Structure formats: structure tokens, C-alpha cells
């Protein structure tokens, strides 16, 4: 089989290596795709074969994309609350707000909280590869890289501080256009699992939220430190 590529001008290229892509489904591993790089081994009579593999990292593939001139993001205006935007990640913050919370489960303590309006602290959102991470801020101003972050004071988080998606609707698009959908989907979902107490209230999660219904301001002194800065959160 033969083929040709029109590069628009006279160009000399030589075969440097080959990429193999592996995909799969199921299993306990979170890995669903893998790529390997193989050097080309040249033999007599112009024949060539692939040499031993080298597992490729995400960083390598991004560098390769830049080398090939691939641009996935178009130039566009960024709202002032956007803190970071890459091909697969967007980080933004929202000011303190008033929102309803919904709780589902057999717990009477949860059912007493559900469907009421509550004050919320300023939040930092991070959406990457269809997953969501959330942190809180003590101040109602835009954070800087050195700003310390706090745990978002909500249930449904794993111990690694990522959001348990459950049945939460996820936006199909990426980037700025997806931000309102992430926020709406998160607060419209039903909280039903308290794996650990994400608050610093001396009497715990329910004692913090129950008297907050109908109030105007979230008591930020009861936020629990996340032990990371905004810069670390973006880079994680």
C-alpha cells in the first residue's frame, strides 16, 4: 500500500518512531487508554520494524500536540472569574451566594435540611476530563496563587477531595460555556452521603447547616482548611 501527503512545499522527512494506542473498558483500574512510543529499527533492503516500547505520559502527548501545531482552544474573551483554562481543565471562582440545597436518604437529619435556601461561601471550581473538584474561600474576593483554600462544606466528596458525581448531570461542552452548567448541576443534585465531616464546626456538619436556613451570610470561621493553595489546586 502506498500513499502521499501534500505538504505544500518541498520537505524532507524521515521516519522517527511509531505510536500505538490501546483502549479498553471495565475492570477495577481507572485507566481506559494507554499510548506507547516505539523507535524505528532499520534493517537491510530498506525494511524497518518497531523497537521496544516506552509508555507515554500526558505531558508528552500535550508536547506532541504542540509540535504538530494542534490547537484545540479558540481565542475568546474570558470572564474575570476564570482562574485557569487549558485544553482539558478550567478553574474558576464564584462569589458568596444564596442557593437551595437538596438532601436524599433515610437520615432524618438530612431530610430536615432539604429544599431550603442557604448562604454559601465563595467557591473555587475545577473541571477536568469530566470530573469536578470544589474548594471554598474565606474571603469574598478573587483569589491569588498564594490564597489558602478550604474544603467545600458539602457532602458527597471522596477522601481525596473530589466530588462524587453520582447522577449529577455533566455538561457535554468544555471551557467557559460549561461553567454555569457545572454550577447548576452540582446544586440541583441530591446530597446523600456524608463520608467525613468537611466542616470545622465543633458540633459537626448538621449543627452547622441547620440554623443557616434563611440566613444571608455563611460563617466562614467554620470552614475546614484544605491544606493547599490555589496554585497547588490548579496544578494537582
Image (tube, grey):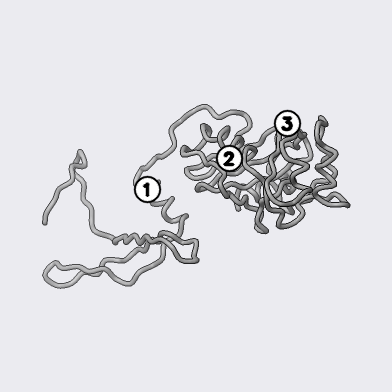
Q: CA distance from mark 3 to mark 1?
A: 43 Å
Residue at 52%, 35% in the rendered image: 178
Mark 2 secondary-structure assignment? strand
Single out the mark in the foreground, 2 or 3: 3
Q: Earlier in the sequence, mark 2 or mark 1?
A: 1
Tell me the residue that label 2 is attached to: 84
Q: Position of residue 68 (x, y in %)?
A: 34, 46
Mark 1 secondary-structure assignment? helix
What crowding class fits label 3: few (fewer than 14 Cα within 10 Å), some (14-19), or many (20 or more)? some
Mark 3 secondary-structure assignment? strand
- Residue 232 vertical placement versus 21 (above, below): above
Q: Nearer the viewer, residue 171 or 51?
A: 171
Tell me the residue that label 3 is attached to: 97
What crowding class fits label 1: few (fewer than 14 Cα within 10 Å), some (14-19), or many (20 or more)? few
Tell me the residue that label 1 is attached to: 67
Residue at 35%, 69% in the rendered image: 53
Q: CA distance from mark 2 to mark 3?
A: 22 Å
Q: Nearer the viewer, residue 226 or 147?
A: 226
Amino acid at each position: 500500500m502506498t500513499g502521499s501527503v501534500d505538504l505544500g512545499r518541498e520537505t524532507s522527512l524521515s521516519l522517527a518512531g511509531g505510536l500505538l494506542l490501546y483502549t479498553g473498558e471495565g475492570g477495577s483500574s481507572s485507566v481506559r487508554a494507554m499510548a506507547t512510543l516505539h523507535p524505528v529499527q532499520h534493517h537491510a533492503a530498506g525494511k524497518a520494524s518497531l523497537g521496544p516500547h516506552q509508555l507515554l505520559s500526558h505531558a508528552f502527548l500535550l508536547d506532541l500536540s504542540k509540535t504538530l501545531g494542534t490547537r484545540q482552544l479558540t481565542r475568546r474573551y474570558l470572564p474575570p472569574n476564570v482562574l485557569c483554562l487549558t485544553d482539558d481543565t478550567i478553574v474558576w471562582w464564584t462569589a458568596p451566594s444564596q442557593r437551595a440545597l437538596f438532601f436524599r436518604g433515610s437520615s432524618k437529619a438530612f431530610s430536615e435540611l432539604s429544599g431550603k435556601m442557604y448562604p454559601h461561601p465563595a467557591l473555587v471550581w475545577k473541571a477536568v476530563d469530566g470530573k469536578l473538584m470544589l474548594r471554598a474561600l474565606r474571603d469574598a474576593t478573587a483569589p491569588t496563587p498564594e490564597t489558602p483554600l478550604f474544603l467545600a462544606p458539602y457532602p458527597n466528596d471522596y477522601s481525596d477531595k473530589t466530588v462524587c458525581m453520582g447522577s449529577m448531570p455533566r455538561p457535554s461542552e468544555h471551557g467557559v460555556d460549561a461553567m454555569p452548567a457545572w454550577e447548576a448541576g452540582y446544586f440541583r443534585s441530591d446530597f446523600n452521603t456524608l463520608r467525613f465531616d468537611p466542616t470545622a464546626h465543633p458540633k459537626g456538619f448538621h449543627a452547622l447547616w441547620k440554623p443557616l436556613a434563611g440566613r444571608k451570610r455563611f460563617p466562614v470561621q467554620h470552614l475546614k482548611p484544605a491544606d493547599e493553595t490555589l496554585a497547588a489546586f490548579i496544578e494537582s
